[in-house]
Image: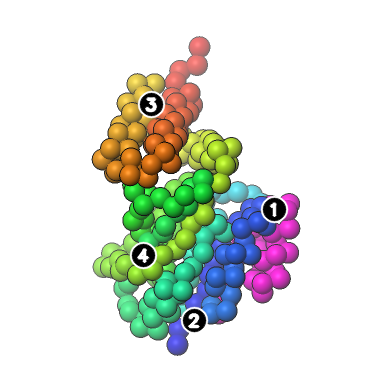
Amino acid sequence: MPTLAVALIVKNEAQELPFCLNSVKDWVDEMIVLDSGSTDGTQAIAQSYGAKVYSNTHWPGFGKQRQLAQTYIKSDYVLWLDADERVTPELKAQIQAAVASDESHTLYQINRLSEVFGKKIHHSGWYPDYVTRLYRTKDTQYDDSLVHESVVVPAGFKLKKLDGHLLHYTYKTLHQYLNKSASYAQAWAEQRAAKGKKASLWDACSHAFARFIRMYLLKRGFMDGKHGFLLAVLSAHSVFVKYAELWIKTSTKR
């Protein structure tokens, strides 16, 4: 039977990490946690669950941090999780079956169901949300992106969807959303600017408006009720901020 590791990159996740590790600790072969400078006891909690804990406080971006974490994995397969995610029993069975079958040239996608501000979101472009999280450790890794990183799909590989849900208990407060959104916007703008990309304030406005229309109308965010409307507005705001950030970074200074 091929072996399976769970891997996480974390920082100050003491409140969420126990629930995440509880959902996998009894059926995986190793747990790898790469911490980026927690001050809330995250590392001690991970160690108490038997995880192998490493530290890298020189933040290189999400993609490269995941690459570093993967170098510590000894198992044949890796399942990537975030601290605010939980594996359901149905998904656990699917993951175990996939590892046991050990198909070549295959990466596995998992359907994530997110809870935002206390409500599970079934529309708004948030669901279904298939993310590539399971693969043979030797086959691939994450890309170099500073933010919104993704697994590289090698030529000739197929993506296979698993049944079951990965429960994602994301933003609980507006303050949390705005802080994370601002951080992502800055990283996105830095990444785009490094590639020579520019933006105008018109780009910021037009892309923000398009995002609201797409989420609330085209992706049926209205079916998520008031939460759907709030998410569409917040997402439009996030898009505006990241394009505005890029404009600020690349506009001519006078």
Decide which of 71, 221 is in the foreground and name it.
Answer: 221
Residue picked out by circle 1: 38
Q: Residue 122: give its label.
A: none
Q: What distance separates the C-alpha of mark 1 from that of mark 2?
A: 29 Å
Q: Residue 143: x percent and y percent?
A: 43, 55
Q: How many marks?
A: 4
The answer to the question of whether label 3 and label 4 lie on touching residues, with beta carbons closer than 8 A, is no
The answer to the question of whether label 3 and label 1 lie on touching residues, with beta carbons closer than 8 A, is no
What is the span of residues highlighted in magenta in the rendered image? 29-55
Residue picked out by circle 2: 3
Q: Quadrant of residue 106?
A: bottom left
Q: What distance separates the C-alpha of mark 3 from that of mark 2?
A: 46 Å
The answer to the question of whether label 3 and label 2 lie on touching residues, with beta carbons closer than 8 A, is no
Mark before the other along the chain sequence, 4 or 1: 1
Mark before the other along the chain sequence, 3 or 4: 4
Q: What distance separates the C-alpha of mark 3 from that of mark 1?
A: 34 Å
Q: Residues within 10 Å of mark 2 (few under 14, many from 20)?
A: some
Q: Amino acid at mark 3?
A: Ala
Residue picked out by circle 3: 204
Q: Residue 60: x percent and y percent?
A: 56, 49
Q: Quadrant of residue 13?
A: bottom right
